Amino acid sequence: MRHILTLVFLFFLASFSAFTQSYFRVTADFSIKDKNPKGSEFYKGKVYFDKEFNKIVYQVSFPEQKTLVLADTQMYVLVNKKIESQSFTPSTNKFTIFNLALSGDLKNYGLDKSGYYINSIEESDDQTIIEWLPPAGLEDKLGKAVLSLKNNQLFGIVLFKPNGEIMGKRFYQNYVSVNGLPFPKKVIQVSYLHGQEYYKITTFENIKIDELENDEMYRIDLYNK
């Protein structure tokens, strides 16, 4: 029975992807409340992302005006359109809310395209819990992931280390449909460091999909800065 449910679910995902409209860019007003080892921080501004250019551009308006650009594994800080600093970041844009939503992969967090496979599916009154296991041969480097679906949308994901410890959690709330694309207006990230739990809450407003204006923000040039 479990095997049949897995096949049905995979068929549904394939069908969903086949008929999903192709989206390429998103912009929104954002606010971030971040509790980390350095303390509590608050930011707000506007964010831009285009799949082709693959840069997340945060135009921060508070507490001070600056622009943060995430490209590949680098984070650039721009002040007055000049690069003030550049640093390495271990994450890429592939698994960000922006790329996952535009690609139609948010529902399963893009795990099927990363070699993960479904181990079990459990149904309850209001949720579907799906356990994904890492690709064969990488169990010593990657842990499992457990997804929760509500109303046919990704509600939460728990990421585990190979040793079974929880690495982090993410929750996606207050979905809206913009040009037919489901997008959560609130994302809660939970991380763990030295036994402490830290939260990062991001909210989005005035979400626009595939706008044709502000092209210079999506393709921001980092080589002439």
Image (cartoon, rainbow, N blue to C red):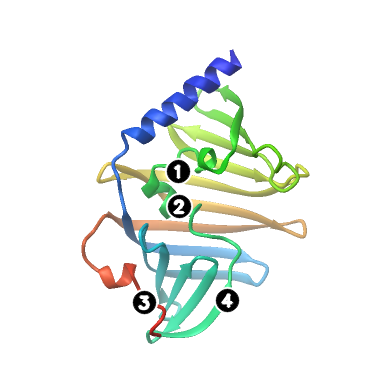
Mark 3 touches mark 2? (CB < 8 Å)? no
Say the numbered circle drawn on residue 47. Answer: none
Identity of the residue furthest to the left in this view: 212
Q: Earlier in the sequence, mark 1 or mark 2?
A: 2
Task: Report how far apart the C-alphas of labels 3 and 2 lie in the structure.
Answer: 23 Å
Q: Position of residue 45 (x, y in %)?
A: 38, 70
Badge 2 or badge 4: first in the primary sequence = 4
Q: Is residue 26 left or right of residue 159?
A: left
Circle on res. 106: 1
Residue at the disc numbered 2: 97
Q: Position of residue 42 (x, y in %)?
A: 50, 69
Q: Which quadrant holds residue 221?
A: bottom left
Q: Marks 1 and 2: CB-CB under 8 Å? A: yes
Marks 3/1 in contact by CB < 8 Å: the verdict is no
Which residue type does callout 3 highlight? Asp
Q: Amino acid at mark 4?
A: Ser
**Neighbourhood count class around disc 2 (C-alpha, 10 Å): few under 14, some 14–19, many 20 upward:** some
Instruction: Quickly name the residue at label 3.
Output: 221
Lower sequence index among marks 3 and 1: 1
Q: Tag 4: Cα neighbours inside 10 Å, few (<14), some, or many (≥20)?
A: few
